[in-house]
Image (cartoon, rainbow, N blue to C red):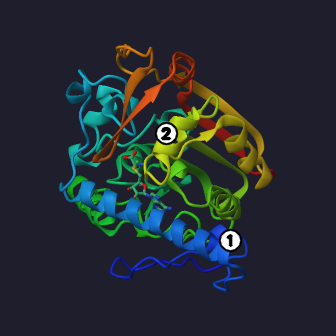
Amino acid sequence: MTEEKVIPPEEKPRQSYSCCGSGSDEVKSTTSEQDMIQSEKIRSDIRKQYSEIATGKMDLPSISEQADSQVAIQSNQEGYTDYSREELSSIPEESNLGLGSGNPVKLANIQPGETVVDLGSGAGVDCFLASRHVGKTGKVIGIDMTPPMIDKARANARKGGYFNVEFRLGEIEHMPVADNSVDLIVSNCVINLSIDKAQVFKDAYRVLKPGGRLVISDIILNQEFPDVVKEAFTDVPGCVSRAWVKDEYLGVIKDAGFKQVELVESEIITPRNQPKKTESGAFKAKLVTYGKEVNVELTPEEYESLRTTIMKGHIRAYKPN
Ligand SMILES: C[S@@+](CC[C@H](N)C(=O)[O-])C[C@H]1O[C@@H](n2cnc3c(N)ncnc32)[C@H](O)[C@@H]1O
């Protein structure tokens, strides 16, 4: 049996070079070296951003603050999550930072005694919700690469007395979890952020037991963003800016070996306000992501396309027996 590898919190997460496919540190060409540097910059920006959110140095813009912006497409907003009042009152208040895009635990049919892993666990919201379903005989493991998030989640676990929840510092592309040891993987608005989504699903396949399942919530695109939006979002480390088109997303999960890969629930997220037209007939759009705003002008066709592009959705998939 493979030993479980636990990375102590004080250890800095290992840099991953899996974006180049081989997992090797060896650099084969200038292009792959540049890609690698760029990918690691994105990862480091993402970690910095969530460190600032965890420590209260960065606030997410609230929906009301966006109310008078023109086409506010926000990379994250409280309105994306989908928890009942009863669920929220059953967990430590500070565990829900409003960073999710759904409620994967609700759709996961968790059974007592199961081992559940949450990818990108943040302050622990979905781990604490899963905790009561797995009960005394089960276990929940949250994985996050941002040390202040792990600290916050551990403080929440202590506060709530969660004996069956554990948080591990690590990257979801190379999880600190044993092979074939997990019944269920959940994740809430995280996999989009990964610099190597295919590797996340390869590793998910490795840690799941045969017959194990994956239930993830994420931002998924119905179609490609208009070019002008794509360009504005280049290198922006947000869940919307890094979202993938549905078929591509489901494709990498299938390629990792999963079966019955399905988008089980989805909802289109339309831009918040009807934008005003400029004299030239273009629409002014404000793309809002963490701490950043990008203003772009859209043609009427681009605006129409954008209205139906962004979805929040849940994907379910199984590792074959
Ligand atoms: C949008 S937040 C979601 C947090 C949590 N799932 C929730 O719903 O509140 C993304 C989280 O994933 C973590 N994260 C992003 N990319 C990661 C990666 N490649 N490996 C591990 N954690 C990652 C971030 O540190 C952050 O805590």
Instruction: Give me the residue at 36% from left, 20% from top.
Output: 272
In the figure, 92 relative to 139: above or below? above
**Residue 242 appears in the rendering:** yes
Q: Quadrant of residue 129?
A: top left
Q: Nearer the viewer, residue 279 or 114?
A: 279
- Residue 7 located left or right of residue 107: left
Q: Residues within 10 Å of mark 1 (few under 14, many from 20)?
A: some
On the image, the x and y values in percent for residue 299 come to 51, 21
Query: Would you name the residue on which mark 1 appears?
Result: 20
On the image, the x and y values in percent for residue 199 come to 66, 62
Instruction: Give me the residue at 23% from left, 21% from top.
Output: 68
- State which image quarter holds ligand 1: bottom left
In the figure, 296 relative to 126: above or below? above
On the image, the x and y values in percent for residue 174 come to 58, 70
**Mark 2 secondary-structure assignment:** helix
- Going from N to C along the chain, the mark reached first, 1 or 2, is 1
Q: Nearer the viewer, residue 54 or 125?
A: 54
Query: Would you name the residue on which mark 2 appears?
Result: 105
Q: Quadrant of residue 148?
A: bottom left
Q: Nearer the viewer, residue 64 or 106?
A: 64
Q: Nearer the viewer, residue 228 or 224?
A: 228
On the image, the x and y values in percent for residue 247 come to 72, 37
Amino acid type, label 1? Cys
Q: Quadrant of residue 132?
A: top left
